Amino acid sequence: MLQTSALTIGYKNGGKTPRVVANQLNLQLSAGEFVCLVGPNGVGKSTLLRTVIGLQPKLAGEIQLSGRILATYHPRELANQVSVVLTTPISVGAMRVDELVAMGRFPFTGMFDRMTDHDWDVVHETLRVVGVENLSHRYIHTLSDGERQKVMIARALAQEPRLLVLDEPTAYLDLPGRVVVMDLLHDLAGGNDKAVLTSTHDLDLALRHADRIWLMDDSGQISQGAPEDLVLNGSFAQIFNRAGVRFDPLSGSFDTQHRGSKPVFLEGQGPEAIWTRRALVRAGYHVEEEKLPAFPSVSVITKNGTTTWQLEHEGQAVTFGSIYELLQELRN
Amino acid sequence: MNQSPDSPASQKTKRLWLFGLFLFLILALFLLNLALGSVRIPLKDIWGILVGKEGVRESWVYIVQNSRLPRVLTAALAGIALSAAGLQMQTMFRNPLADPFILGINSGASLGVAIAILGSGFVGGLFLPALNLRGEFSLVLAASAGAGLVLALILLVGRWVQNPTTLLILGLMFGHATSAVVSLLVYFSAPERIQAYSIWSFGSFSGVNWTQLKVMSLVILAGVGLMALLPKGLNALLLGEDYARTMGLNVGLLRFTILLSASVLSGAVTAFCGPIGFIGVAVPHIARNLFKTSNHKILIPAIILIGAAVSMAASLIAQLPGSQLVLPINVVTSLFGAPFVVWVILKRKRGATSFNV
């Protein structure tokens, strides 16, 4: 659906040499796909998105949308193909949710924005798909950040685009809000001929939800592939392994690199043991494979549905009812 | 449970009532403006004069036909024009305090008029109280050209400067620069021309005769007509120019149309009535607060009604009914308008019913 060849993006700098953000980009995005554009801050993700939707001129190369060169689209034709949710917070004053979503019908209504019954049907349907039909009469400024973001997505969907492009849609949201939005975007892309392209900082979520990832590095190079491919071939580790941050291919998450130096032994199973290990690592311990009398040993014991932590050290054994108490003891 | 107490249906009814209320207010203010002044004329005689009945006192007929009727029509038109220009500027710059005056557009118009009145001392032929037809057009043209020039300059700079605050400061600076040129003209001009200019700058709805009124109403009709084509574009601009573009709108054309409409409207008012402040910034806020919306499909008719009513009320107060005194319009609008703008700033909350940046 979207294809770039030898694309160079950046800013025309008056008469001077243009500031190139990235060049030689050969990207593909197919119908039905949910693509996440990820990369460290400031590598030019927004610039790329703005360029492929025609908000910003390209410096060189070619962009094709539905098999046709992007620049040949009339703005209104383009609006029938692509709709966007931008990262800038909106401030529309006093406007109801249904009025705002109805603005998505602008490419279809005439000069005076006369809404037909069909237009309103589309508005209500998108409100339902996004799951905000109960908000339709609320004023925008009374919504939470998550609700407002969903409404903006509904507005973009009301445009009935083939390609939905979003710039950091999860930026202002809390964790549940982010999961909900990513789930929604994934569902929107699946099935028919719609595709979704979004930039995001939520790597965990991108890894879980995306059909394809465009991974952009500091030099503007983009590696693309299924998230799992990029994890396995080390692209993720390479780009995000910076001072203090380590990408763990086993858990698919990021760790801080400070490792414990004090040895400790841990015995136990299940989530209790996993979370105890995390707590110990945070407290500056290194969990050893072997139990030795020279350093402390922690046993996680679950009996009759209650968990206790037993600390053995220098021949003494103390039992605690919570990880917090255990850590306090270890600290002393 | 989270449903707004204002359902769209009850909102619609409420808005219809408001439109009705303002229509009534306009009618009442129209009659009061004709009846009250240095001489009080009974309403039944006003009616008689309007329908052309015989037997009404000759001097009253004269006063109504040649002074009060053109004045109240001028006031209504000017109020509509200023509100329309103000609304468009506020939406376009996405700034609640924007109005043509604040951006220096009226200063541009003032410069045009100053050059026409004061500069004509060196060219000859133009003098405000004794305008010939060519004079009328050249004043409108001078004011419109001045207004359009400054607005075009702001838009040109605005292509590079995206920050609205910077743009506002630039507008302020344009304003200062033009007043400097006006001061220079004043400094070298004959006293009677200076007086003519300074009386013009106080603002007045009284100096407009029927011929001038025809010209003014045509120009304002054109400006308001342009705006009437734009509710969709203005609504799109609430989301910002980028969104407007991705919705298939021609933002360049939209910007140009707004520029044209606003500069023609503010230029026309400034030319015929002087630089009248505050109506342009205050009326759009009154409309947003009363109608609880920033949807231009509702705001545009709303500001037309409210603009006319507010301006007619100012005109009535300026006459100081019962006295021989007449206050300059700017004194009235500023005395009421300044506290209003202060109130808007203080009341402005994040996302409240007022337009926010």
Image (tube, coloured by chain):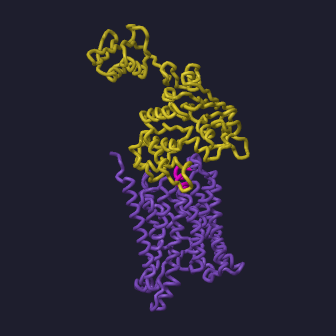
Chain colours: A yellow, B purple
Residue B55 left/right relative to A62 = left
- Name the residue at the left extreme: A304
Q: Position of residue A33 (x, y in %)?
A: 55, 30
What secondary structure is the stretch in magenta mostly built from? helix
Q: Position of residue B11 (x, y in %)?
A: 39, 57
Q: Is residue A135 above or below residue B222?
A: above
Q: Is residue B209 above or below residue A22?
A: below
Q: Name the residue nearer the viewer: A322 or B53.
A: B53
Boundaries of the magenta span:
B232-240
Image point (48%, 68%), residue name: B307
Occupied quadrant, residue B209: bottom right
Quick check: is A239 in the magenta stretch?
no
Residue B92 visible (yes or no): no
Residue B64 left/right relative to B106 = left
Image point (39%, 7%), residue name: A292
Occupied quadrant, residue A221: top right
Q: Name the residue nearer the viewer: B43 or B262.
A: B43
Q: Count the marks: how many?
A: 0
Residue A102 visible (yes or no): yes
Residue B147 left/right relative to B321 = right
Quick check: is B233 in the magenta stretch?
yes
Q: Position of residue A51 (x, y in %)?
A: 63, 40
**Image quarter (top left, top right, bottom left or bottom right) of the N terminus of chain B:** top left
Residue A256 left/right relative to A26 = left
Q: Name the residue nearer the viewer: B54 or B243.
A: B54
Image point (46%, 90%), residue name: B54
Occupied quadrant, residue B198: bottom right
Q: Position of residue B43 (x, y in %)?
A: 40, 83
Q: Is residue B185 above or below residue A49?
A: below
